[in-house]
Image: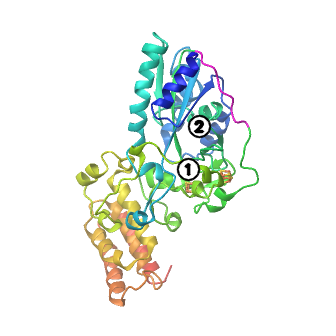
Amino acid sequence: MNATQELKAHALALGFDAVGVAAVARLDAQAHYDAWLAADRHGEMAWLASDKHRARRAKPELLVKDIRSVLCVALCHPPDRDIARDQRLGRIARYAAGEDYHRIMKDKLLPLERWIRTELFPGSHSLWYADTGAILERGWAERAGLGWTGKHSGLLHPQRGSWFLLGEILMDRELEPDVPIGKDHCGTCTRCIDVCPTRAIVAPYQVDARLCISYLTIELRGPIPRELRPAIGDWIFGCDLCQEVCPWNRFAPPAREARLHANELSGWSLERFLRIGEQEFMELFADSPIRRANRAGFVRNVCVALGNRGERQAIAPLMQTLTRDKEALVRGHAAWALGQLARGDGAAGATSREILEAREALKGAMLDADPFVREEATAAFAVAQGHA
Ligand code: SF4
Ligand code: SF4
C-alpha cells in the first residue's frame, strides 16, 4: 500500500463513508462563490464576505503553508424520517436531528490528523475542517470525486445521494489525487427547484440564502420576513425538501454513525417548546446543532410552525407566549401565529369563543411595550378580522 491508500483505509476504518483526495489548484467553485457573495445572497452571514475569509478561501496556502493536498471525507446521516416524531415536534433537518455533527467530525478527524502528523508523514503540517472555517468545502469535495454539485447547489453522488456531511484535512504532503466525477448528472430534472416553497433556488445551481428556510430558521437572528412565514410550513430547524425530492436519494445508504440518528426528545411537543426557558434550552440541546439557533430564534421558529399548522390546541399556548415571553422577537411571532389561527378559516375546529379570545389577546398585544410586537399584533389582528 502506498501512503494515499494507507491514509484512505485509515479514514474508512474510522467510520467515514467515502474519502477522496483533491489536488491543490484554484477551484472552479471559487468564481461561483464570489458571484454569490457579490449578489448579497449570503444575507446576514457577513463573516463570509469579510476580507479575511475571502483571502483564506481563495488561498488555502494561508491556512497551511506549502499545502499540497486536501483529503476530503464524507459521513452519511440517516436518509429516513420518523413521521410520528415530525407530527409532535415539527420538522428538523435530518443532519441536525441527532448529535452535533461538528463534534462527531472532530472526534474522527482529530485522531486522523494526528496519525498523519505522527505516523504517516512525521513532521508534516496539517489542519482539519468540518464546516468550521473559511474553505470551499463542496468545491474541494467535488474535485476529490465525492460528488457533483446539483441544481440545489448541494453535493450528490450516484451511489450515496446527498444525505452526507463533509470534512477535510489540508496537508503539506503530496497524495495521489482522485478524478472528479466531471459530469453533471442532473440532466433535465428540476424537481428541487420546483419543490422549494420559498423559491430560494433562484436559478439552477444558485441558492439565495436570504430566501432559504435553512438560513431563515438557523442563521437569521431577527424576525423572519412576514411574507416568507407561510412557506416555511412546520420546519423548525433547517429544511430538507430539495433533497427529499431528488431522484438520486433513492440510492442513499443508511447511516452507520449511531450518533447521527435522531434524538427522541420524549415528552416534548411544539406546544411545550413554547414554554422552554433559557437554561432548559441549553440543557436539552447541549449536544445538538439546534443550540446554534439560540432559544429566542428557536421559539420564534416554533411559533411560525404552529401558525402554519392550523391546529386549535395551539391557540391557548400561543396566547400565553404572547403575553409572557421575555423576548419581543418571540412575542411578535406568537402574534403572527395567533393571527393565522384566529382567521375565519384558521384553526380547524376552534370554537367562536377561542377565536374571540385570540383576537382579544392580539388587541392587548397592540399595547405591548415593544414596537416590533405592537406592529406584529396590529398586522395579525387585521388578518384575524379578515382585513388583510
Ligand atoms: S433547503 Fe428548502 S428552502 Fe432551502 S433551497 Fe432547499 S427546498 Fe428551498
Ligand atoms: S432534484 Fe434533480 S435537479 Fe435537483 S439536484 Fe437532484 S437530480 Fe439535480
Q: Is residue 122 magenta?
A: no
Q: Main secondary structure of the magenta part?
A: loop
| Quadrant in the picture for residue 100 | top left
Q: In this view, does 354 lie above or below 126?
A: below
Q: Where residue 112 sits: x, y (%)?
A: 44, 24
Percent across and percent down for residue 167 are 50, 33
Along the horizontal axis of the image, is 228 left or right of 153? Answer: left
Q: Tell me the residue at 36%/81% (across/down).
A: 359
Q: In which quarter of the image is residue 189?
A: bottom right
Q: Name the residue under label 1.
A: 209
Numbered disc 1: secondary structure: helix
Q: Nearer the viewer, residue 134 or 377?
A: 134
From the viewer's side, name the closer residue of 92 and 322. Answer: 92
| Depth check, front residue: 233 or 18 | 18
Secondary structure beneath label 2: helix
Q: State the CA–CA distance, disc 1 to disc 2.
A: 16 Å
- Classify residue 176 as left or right of residue 264: right
Query: Residue 190 at what x, y percent from top left?
Result: 70, 57
Image spot of residue 94 (x, y percent) = 47, 52
The amino acid at mark 2 is Arg
Quadrant in which the N terminus appears: top right
Residue 160, relative to residue 197: is it above or below? above
Magenta part of the chain: 174-182
Q: Earlier in the sequence, mark 1 or mark 2?
A: 2
Outermost residue toward the right in this view: 188
Position of residue 132 in the picture relative to residue 189 (left or right): left
Q: Which mark is residue 138?
A: 2
Amino acid type, mark 1: Ala
The correct choice, above or below, for 385 with respect to 100 in the image is: below
